[in-house]
Amino acid sequence: MRRKEFDMSEQAEQIEAFLQEMSFGVLGTNGSDGWPELTPLNFVFANGVIYFHGSIAGRKMKNLKADEHVTFSVAKEYAIIPSYFSGAELACPATAFFKSVVIKGIARPVSDLEEKAEALGAFMRKLQPEGGYAPLDASDPDYIGNLKSTSVVRIDIQELTAKYKFGQNMKTEKWDKVADSLCRRNEGMDNETVAMMRSLCPHAGQSDEADDV
């Protein structure tokens, strides 16, 4: 069961910002042998849909031709939280803070060259923001061949769930210990993790007495 304090599914702006930030996800398709198949791939979120690209042939394209229902997931781990950050002697409190989005949708190949060019242009702006290339244009003869030979798939989102876990369920004393320990460790994304804790936890900076009111 998804704990409601971690559920971000109704926060459209935050979810969109996360999907715009990330460039790598995992596609789940239904294999012909009855086994689910997972494919890590680059993606872009544009115009309210997910796009990915690749070769016209391949296992995922074969799977999609047989069944267009897919699951797509994106996740970002911010920090490992050791059990001793909260002063516990047992291992149980050890955890990780992260963001994740899981999408169920319908995946269909894009045939329209203008939509292909728009999607691939979004890829380039995301993965090569410094430019250095001719803008993708479906009417440009230098691009037409590549656009026709490249498979672009659009996932129309049917259901989306998002989970952001940053200590929202912690009591104030434990929350303070974890935040302080992250600040003192100061490695990797620890500072960003504390910032997320402060933005998402309603009791951040409050006293234990305030929690009991």
Image (cartoon, rainbow, N blue to C red):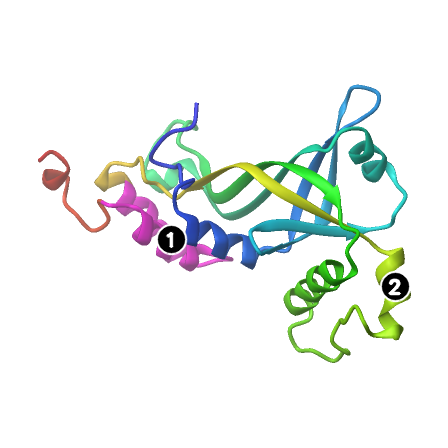
- Name the foreground residue: 153 vs 199: 153
Question: How would you rate the neighbour count of disc 2 (Cα within 10 Å): few for under 14, some for 14-19, many for 20 or more?
Answer: few
Is residue 109 left or right of 208 when viewed as pictured?
right
User: Do the numbered discs 2 and 1 sit on residues whose CB atoms are within 8 Å?
Assistant: no
Rendering quarter of residue 186: bottom left
Residue 196 numbered mark, or none = 1
Q: In the image, is residue 130 part of the stretch drawn in magenta?
A: no
Q: What's the residue at 24%, 45% (across, down)?
A: 202
Q: In what element is the residue under mark 1? A: helix
Magenta residues, start to end: 175-202
Q: What's the residue at 71%, 59% (across, down)?
A: 115
Q: Position of residue 164 (x, y in %)?
A: 43, 42
Q: In what element is the residue under mark 2? A: helix
Question: How would you rate the neighbour count of disc 1 (Cα within 10 Å): few for under 14, some for 14-19, many for 20 or more?
Answer: some
Rendering quarter of residue 132: bottom right
Mark 2: amino acid: Asn
Quadrant holding the N terminus: top left
Residue behind mark 2: 146
Mark 1: amino acid: Met
Q: Main secondary structure of the magenta part?
A: helix
Q: Position of residue 66 (x, y in %)?
A: 81, 29
Q: What's the residue at 65%, 46% (across, down)?
A: 25
